[in-house]
Image (cartoon, rainbow, N blue to C red):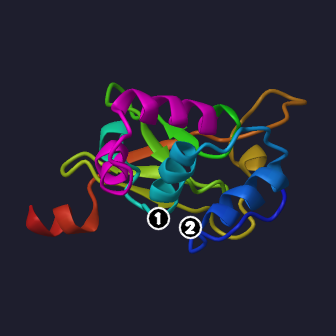
Amino acid sequence: MPSLPSRASASASGLECRMALLGADVRLTPHRREVFEVLQGSTDHPTATDIFTRVKDRSPSISLATVYNCLEHLSSAGLIKQVHLERGQSRYCANLHEHVHFHCETCGKVTDAHPAAGFDPAKFWNLPAGTKITRTELAIHGTCASCATKG
């Protein structure tokens, strides 16, 4: 995978750079830019409603349906990830680097967990011979450090 822009780059040019690196063909509407910028600046894996609330401050004319449409276009183009955690609402992640998600079952917080250096999923999992991994979607469930100290 090509090197991706850092999370610190939340500008529209960051989105354009990501699009160029990934070869994504998405029309950049003002609302799509706003949704991406809000998501790029978030580390809490917000739901569509969370994103709508944050974008609404910056773009008062946007609707929740428009946010859903923007998220659909951005995720189908591979510019963001849609995160599914069992039966909960979908969450969204702008981090395209290889990682999994840790979900605290007590407070609901979702955080990124990056692989240890040199981790090779093809060697870790007992996969059928000849299998080629194209992406990994894994959620690890448990209790975060903050919740563990409360209990």
- Neighbor class of circle 2 (other Cα within 10 Å; few <14, some 14-19, many 20+) is some
Q: Which residue is drawn at 84% across and 31% down?
A: 131
> Which residue is labeled 1 in the image?
41
* Residue at mark 1 to residue at mark 2: CA–CA distance: 6 Å
Q: Which residue lies furthest to the front in this view?
A: 61
Q: Which residue is drawn at 75% across and 66% down?
A: 118
Q: Which residue is drawn at 80% across and 65% down?
A: 3
Report the side of 144 relative to 95 (left or right): left
Nearer to me, 109 or 123: 109
Nearer to me, 126 or 52: 52
- Magenta residues, as a range? 51-75
Question: In x, y percent, where is residue 116?
Answer: 63, 67
Report the side of 73 relative to 88 (left or right): right
- Neighbor class of circle 1 (other Cα within 10 Å; few <14, some 14-19, many 20+) is some
Q: Residue furthest bottom?
A: 8
> Which residue is labeled 2 in the image?
10
Residue 96: give its label. Answer: none
Question: Which amino acid, by three-letter code, is at mark 2?
Answer: Ala
Instruction: Residue 42: name its quadrant.
Output: bottom left
CB-based contact (under 8 Å), mark 1 and mark 2: yes
Question: In x, y percent, where is residue 110?
Answer: 36, 52
Report the side of 33 relative to 79 (left or right): left
Nearer to me, 72 or 116: 72
Question: In x, y percent, where is residue 67?
Answer: 43, 36
Quadrant (top left, top right, bottom left, bottom right) of the N terminus: bottom right
Question: Height in image: 85 above or below 56?
Answer: above
Nearer to me, 121 or 138: 138
Report the side of 8 relative to 123 (left or right): left
Question: In x, y percent, where is residue 55?
Answer: 37, 51
Mark 1, secondary structure of its residue: loop
Question: Height in image: 131 above or below 53?
Answer: above
